[in-house]
Image (cartoon, helix red, strand yellow):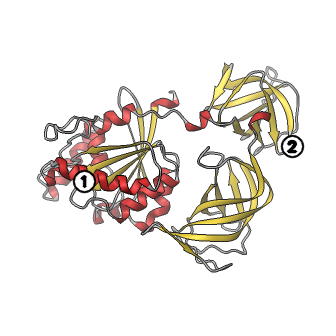
Amino acid sequence: MEHSNIVRFTTAGSVDDGKSTLIGRLLYDSKSVYTDQMENIIASSEKKGNQQIDFSLLTDGLKDERTQGITIDVAYRYFSTPKRKFIIADTPGHIQYTRNMITGASTANAALILIDARKGVVEQTRRHTYIATLLNIPHLLVCINKMDLMEYNEETFENIKADFEILTAQFNHHHIQYIPISALHGDNVVDRSLNMDWYKGLPLLETLESLNIEHQESKTAARIFVQTIIRPHSTEFHDFRGYAGRIDGGEFSIGDEVVILPSNQTAKIKEIYCGSKQLEVAVSPLSVTFTLDRELDISRGDLFTKSAEMPNESNEVLATMCWFNERNLNLKTTYIFRIGTRTLRCKISEILHLMDVHTLNQIPLEENESQITLNDIFRAKLKLNETLFYDVYTENRQTGSFILVDPISNETVAVGMIG
């Protein structure tokens, strides 16, 4: 399966905007639901006294979700059409689950921002759009839902679109599409709506099928973190030494001279394997194994690049971060810093400001005072124990992002985007 045929998208919106219903409708109308599962959903809908099928039951799998009617964790769903395969990250709408949205959206090609046609752009719309932009998600699909409750009125759609454009003007996001839908009735979800003949665009599923998701990293500088060293120790491959990893940027070809960081050793690529298949050229995001024209001392976490495409290097970086842990940030703690497959140690040396996700304003913090709590988004300066090789996150999402791990509990306490 080529990576261009797999679309990862996340859903975001306020509570009761209809995310679960929309995903359920996509699964149902694309015939991705088993017959017995559908029979259970119909029975559950009737038991609840619903006159129509409650498609949200297809996605609200947790008991607490079904009881409260809310989504409280990231739920991954899968479906396919003849054109593409899709992976959905259904993320919560509540502010206390900001970390869940960031987790679900971190690898997304697109974000579905749901807006209730009755309410228009609200605070959570602003926050979710900010996070989608912060994570550099290439495509925003703004689904203005519950159009049936507004009598499928074009003016309502245009007014909300205008308000959203005012919001996104400050984010400088270029790939935004607007779709008026009714998830409950299926208008413009899979099939074009007869109730909104004024809308000339594609329905949601066709929009997803037609997205240009060429990987941004494939256009950037060549990068691959070594994940493991392959030494079969077999008779057939007695002298084989391969360096395996996922290409996180650009392309590599047989004969290319590569630089291995942090040692600055150089060698030429002798062979490239993708599984058992040999390649002449390999591009992001393939997972491959290289052999080199000479033996070098290379370890997990080393970075392959090219001399004309060297990354930034420093032992101090600025980053936008989200705090994941229930224990507050501690400026005295030395955290484990992981980028790609490389592990370093770091301290957060300075917190520049906290982001108010309600207003999107910056809140300055007193010097050396830690007020960072669960789900907070903030700017900070980090000091590392070794030289870090990295790219700015807006140029490469893989080599510009990192996680912090608590050295005692081994919990992931934060994620960060460098730049």
Q: Is residue 340 above or below residue 350?
A: above
Query: Looking at the picture, how far across and down is residue 252, in whole percent?
Result: 70, 28
Q: Amino acid at mark 2?
A: Ser
**Residue sitting at x 59%, y 62%:** 321
Mark 2 burial class by Cα count in 10 Å: few <14, some 14-19, many 20+: few
**Residue sitting at x 58%, y 75%:** 364
Q: Residue 263 shows which numbered tag?
A: 2
Residue 74 in view here: no
Question: Quadrant of residue 94 in the image?
Answer: bottom left
**To which residue does mark 1 refer?**
159
Question: Quadrant of residue 187 in the image?
Answer: top left
Label 2–label 1 contact, CB within 8 A: no
**Residue sitting at x 64%, y 71%:** 351
Image quarter where the C terminus lies is bottom right
Query: Looking at the picture, how far across and down is residue 357, in whole percent?
Result: 46, 67
Query: Looking at the picture, how far across and down is residue 346, in whole percent?
Result: 74, 63
Q: Amino acid at mark 1?
A: Asn
